[in-house]
Amino acid sequence: MFDLAERLSANKNNESKLSNKLKTMLFYQTEECRSLVNESFRFDGKDDPKCVKNRDEEFRQIDLLNPPEVVIIELNASQDVVQDAQRLAHLLPSQVSVVIVGSEDAISTIRLLKEMGFYYLFWPVSKQECSDFIRNVLDNHEQHKGLMANRKAKRIAMVGVKGGVGVSLISSEISRSLSLDKGVSTLLVDHNYHGGNLDIFMGLKQYQKRAVQKGTLLSNIDGTYALGVIRKVTPMLSMLAIDSEELSTQELNEYTLAVQEQVLNNSSVMIEDYAHLIRNEGDIVSLLQRIDVLIFVFDETVSALRDYNRLNQLVKKNNVDNHTRIISVLNSSRPVNSGSVSLDEIEKYSAQRPHIIVPYDEKAPQHILEGQQIIRTKSSMALPLINLIALILGEDQKQEKRSIFRFFKHKG
């Protein structure tokens, strides 16, 4: 005879056993938090989580190919819980359930963390409350529901105000450095259809974009199909680049966006190389609805400055509640003193100084042809590009080290 109560009890026991096997890590700041979390796990008959000090270098040691299922991060010592959580988010694979422990008592904190896909456990908390909370998180993770479903890649759009300002070069440098130097799972998206040199900047040989046929329906694009379109460059870096002799630029863009939506949970950061495809207010509005960070790239020409000011005004008009961060990059594409406008003039007419200034380096093309990352060379472009990555991730920027010889040379 079928016993429903017995079957339900058996299912509950099976779920409990599954939860016991989940790999959990605790990044703690205080012994009090570490002790309470461990006691809560033992209280429920679970193995202690792996406990390490809450330091950035420890996060970078996470095995991204075999990550923990649940990560608990204590931020009781934080001055701004949301800001610190955002800074750490890129170091955590998107398939991980994240619990933030903090003493910041504000509705806005809970709301913003929830939007990021993070749970918030308010401190101080009793052992029973902690146990109930963690059990709920583990069960949600096991059933692939809860806030983990809200965790998606941070989307960064690289937009050139006109062609030839170096967007693809900067996009490739950021993507390679994030994946190789920072250990961040990264997807680079090429929106330069019917051309582009992104493969050259990436150091890829005999590379061809994925050809798309006219009959491909957007409604047929699912997660499995999307993963088949994406090319794995390294274990932590993937690339999406398509082309077609039959489809228009608009159709290819819609196809690319459909693929992106299917793989948002597969990477921590998504870099989108838009080159000069964003031209009007409609493009700006559509872009701002999808992305987290917008990076404008322009050079020191009159035409680029005019286009930058025009597009920037459209962004200010449509960036509701400043939801999207805006970063400006002046990429010097010609030798010093040969540009049409000076830095002072740029500041005057745009009413702000560029966040990042990348100097001209005549040796840059040689580095690129040799397949090198400019960031890993002694190029004068390296430090500004490193600082652009730091700005994106919310890290402190590095100051240029100036030798005594250069100091006296400058003084002279």
Image (cartoon, rainbow, N blue to C red):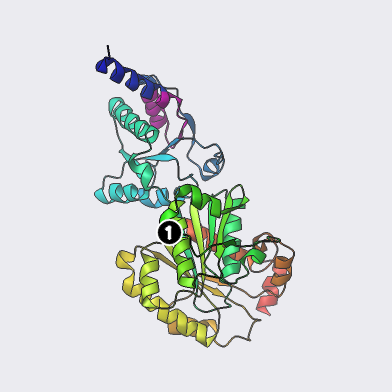
Q: Is residue 66 left or right of residue 315?
A: right
- Give the residue number, with chain letter if any, for mark 1: 218
In the depicted view, which residue is nearer to us: 327 or 192? 192
Quadrant of the rendering where the N terminus is positioned? top left
Is residue 64 a member of the stretch shown in magenta?
no
In the depicted view, which residue is nearer to us: 125 or 278? 278
Rendered position, 28 above or below 206: above
Give the magenta part as a residue range: 18-41
Q: Helix, strand or loop at disc 1?
A: helix
Rendered position, 297 above or below 73: below
Q: Is residue 4 left or right of residue 237?
A: left
The residue depicted at 41 percent of the width and 21 percent of the height is 17
In the depicted view, which residue is nearer to us: 308 or 371? 371
The spot of residue 229 in percent (x, y) is 54, 54
The residue depicted at 51 percent of the width and 75 percent of the height is 276
The spot of residue 43 in percent (x, y) is 35, 20
Secondary structure predominantly adopted by residues drawn in magenta: helix
The spot of residue 238 in percent (x, y) is 57, 53
Q: Is residue 91 visible?
A: yes
Rendered position, 129 above or below 4: below
Q: Give the crowd class for mark 1: few <14, some 14-19, many >=20 residues within 10 Å.
A: some
